[in-house]
Amino acid sequence: MKEIKLVFTGSMGAGKTTAISALSEIPVINTDVSATDEVIARKATTTVALDYGEMTLSDGQKLRLYGTPGQQRFAYMWKILMQGALGLIILVDNAGENPLGDLELYLNHFHEDIEKTTAVIGVTRMDLSKKPNLAAYNDFLRKRNLHLPVFSVDVRRKQNVIMMVQALVAMLEY
Amino acid sequence: MPYILATYALEKSDRLFMKSMIEMANKRFGLQWSLDDLHGQVTVVDIDTEEGRSFWKINSARKTLIAYAQTNTYLAPFFLEKPLKVQLVTDLLKKLTCKISPTSTLSISYPSTVSLSSQASSLIVDYKPENYLAGLLKNILSEGKPYILQLTGTPPLYVVPDDQMCYTIDIDLSDNTPTQQMWMKSTANLFSKSPLDNTKLDLIRHDFVGIDINAFIWVSTLQSSNGNLLTGHSLTNTAQLKEWPNFSILPYDSTQIQLAAFMSKNIASIPRISANTRQPIPHIINFYNACVMLDLINIEKITQEISETTKNISTEKKSLLQSILQRLLK
């Protein structure tokens, strides 16, 4: 049976684990996975951490929630996780060094997946850092000709996370 | 043949009242209606609730539904106004009896099949936001100075443009309390407006809760528009959202998320939006007005040409997406 999944991505500390916890009906599993990729195995054994949560739908199917490892050196995992995903939620830490740079990184990396499915952008920690503001994010997306929803969110608030998934579902319909 | 009326999203008290009124109508006019929770030839849907609106959106095309609400925002052919009245319930049951059994001897006038667009057009008048709180707040924002707005019988609103905040008692604008409705729907001339002394700002920030001014403008526009299009705008114009409303601070419902998704990806007129999203024109107008007030619609892009992308998703995927939404709202 095909897996039904949503992927949460973003830099370390952007709130992926918290966002998944808000939705998951099981405690979020932070998975250490041995990288068995042949290339990696030739060089060294390493571990990759990703988050996992799930929700049960009315017909018993599981909606699986994956959080990508934040470190860029595990970017190869991001693509693997996105295979067959319904869509992508990108969380950007507005209190980070270069939030728009972070967003650009994820948009570049996932641009093919976003074209096939869709993405929603949640900007976290805007209470700590007001700039860039949402207008700046929207300008950034417009220059890339992307019509994606951008919200300021507090992923500790379940309703904010639900809202992002609602937006993602709506984007998939239209 | 007995007829069954099902209900959806009604409060328990409304169900009880409705049951009594149906029994009275049956006795008086020889009707044969009963009430059921789940299944019936017709379903009464409380569209003042989000749950009811979602149900309406999914089922209005394939089931006979009655819109139960304070106002007939959906221009539904079968409508029951709140609060329930025996006469209205009786009249409606008679109409429905004739619809289901056309040979029935009950005399009724069946709703005309005037198209939705022309129905909506005949009802639309100009909406002037300056006549409501939304306009007052926009003016204060452009002036840049703090003011107190006071409406008799409600707490004051301390409007501080520098903070982009209205300070007031601790409220949630999603609650739509009677006080909030008074703010949002009262005409501007009922508000007193007085300058707010800058020396008092720190105290106000400390003693009251700050709510984003845009949230007030948003809710006020939605509630005071009443299906009327902004002055200077036309149903034949086309528009596209240049950015989504920030639903993390703006009260919203699932239908508005649908509208935002469609309108962000498409350049379309309001009737076209209605046809694609299956939402009533007055509801879309209210949303459109609110987006214009928050400068979310790219006015430079309004053209006479309609450009659309239509997505065909499989029934299976649609069902999956609905299932996800239902689970989220559980």
Image (spheres, coloured by chain):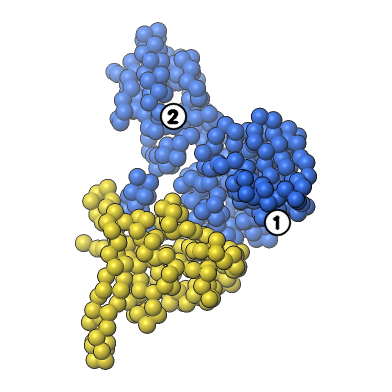
Chain colours: A yellow, B blue
In the image: residue B108, left or right of residue B269? left
Looking at the rendered structure, whether the residues under marks 2 and 1 are on a common chain is answered as: yes
Q: Secondary structure at mark 1?
A: helix
Q: Which residue is under mark 2?
A: B66
Query: Label 2: chain?
Result: B
Identify residue type, mark 2: Ile
In this image, B189 relative to A5: left or right? Answer: right
Residue at point 58%, 71% (across, down): A140
Corner quadrant of residue B156: top right
Helix, strand or loop under label 2: strand
> On screen, A114 above or below A76?
above
**Along the line of sight, the residue nearer the viewer: A41 or B230:** A41
Of B111 and B3, nearer the camera is B3
Residue A130 placed where, x, y %? 59, 64
Callout 1, which amino acid? Asp
Q: Which mark is residue B162?
A: 1
